[in-house]
Amino acid sequence: MRTKLGHAIGMLLLTSAMVLCGNSIVYVRAHPGGGYIDGIARAVPGVFILMLFVLAGILCRLYIPVKLPASAYILAIGCILSIPGAPGSAGPVSQFMNSLSGTIMRYVGEVSFMSLATPALAYAGLSWAKDRGELGRSWWRIAIVSALVFVGTFLGSAIIADAVLRVTGQI
C-alpha cells in the first residue's frame, strides 16, 4: 500500500508540474503582455488545491473499506467543498462554506482546463496502451493515424474558418 501511495504522489507531482507549464503557455497566449512566470504564479494556488483534492481522494480509496474508484472520492470531495452555503442562510456553517467555496473557485478558476486535460488524457492513453501491450506492436499505426487526424483537424478548421470569414464579409 505504501508503494501505491508513493507512486500516486509522484505522479501527482509530475502532473502538477505539467499543468503549471501548460497553464503558463495558455496564459501567455491569452495575455500577450504577461510572461510565463505570471501564468505559473497565478495557477499555483489552484493547482495546489486540486492536488489536495486528488490526494484526499487517493487516501479515501486506500483506507475507506467501501471500494469505490479514487475518481469518485475526488469528485465527491471537490463538489462538497465547492458548494456554497445554503442560499439565504446566515448561520456560521453557511458563511464558512460560502467563504470556502468562493476561495476554491477563485483560485481553481485560474487553472486552464486545457492544461488539466492534456496530461490526464496522455496518462490515460499511455496507461491503456501499457496494459494492453499494443503500443509496442502498433506504434507505427498510431503515428500514421495521429498524423492524419492532426492534418485533417487543421484542414477542417481552416476550411470552416475560411467559410465563416467569407460569409461574414471579413475576407
Image (cartoon, rainbow, N blue to C red):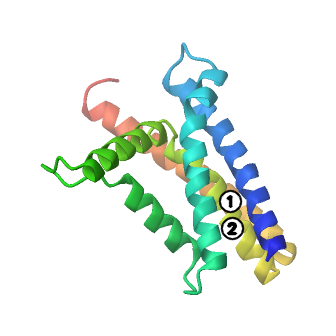
Q: CB atoms at circles 2 and 1 under 8 Å apart?
A: yes
Residue extending furthest bottom?
66
**Secondary-structure class at tag 1:** helix
What residue is drawn where x is 41% and y is 55%?
81
Q: CA distance from mark 2 to mark 1?
A: 5 Å
| For residue 35, side relative to residue 167 (left or right) | right
Q: Position of residue 138 (x, y in %)?
A: 81, 74
Q: Which residue is mark 2?
A: 125
Task: Choose between 112 and 45: the one closer to the eye.
Answer: 45
100 versus 72 height, above or below: above
In the image, 141 versus 35, the foreground residue is: 35
The structure residue drawn at horizontal position 47% and vertical position 45%, both measured from the top left corner, is: 157
- Numbered label attached to residue 145: none
Task: Please tell me whether residue 65 is drawn above or below residue 138 in the rendered image.
Answer: below
Q: Is residue 129 above or below residue 17?
A: below
Q: Nearer the viewer, residue 23 or 16?
A: 16
Residue highlighted by disc 1: 122
Image location (x, y in percent) of residue 100: 39, 45
Residue located farthest toward the right when viewing the structure as drawn: 136
Residue 146 rendering spot, x and y as whole percentages: 68, 60
99 with respect to 148 (left or right): left
Residue at 32 percent of width and 37 percent of height:
164
For badge 1, the amino acid type reads Ala
Q: Residue furthest front?
A: 92
Q: Amino acid at mark 2?
A: Gly
Q: Residues within 10 Å of mark 2 (few under 14, many from 20)?
A: few
Local crowd at mark 1 within 10 Å, few (<14), some, or many (≥20)?
Answer: few
Q: Is residue 90 left or right of residue 111?
A: left
Residue 87 screen position, x and y as percent = 16, 51
Q: How many marks can you see? A: 2
Q: Quadrant of residue 142?
A: bottom right
Q: Secondary structure at mark 2?
A: helix
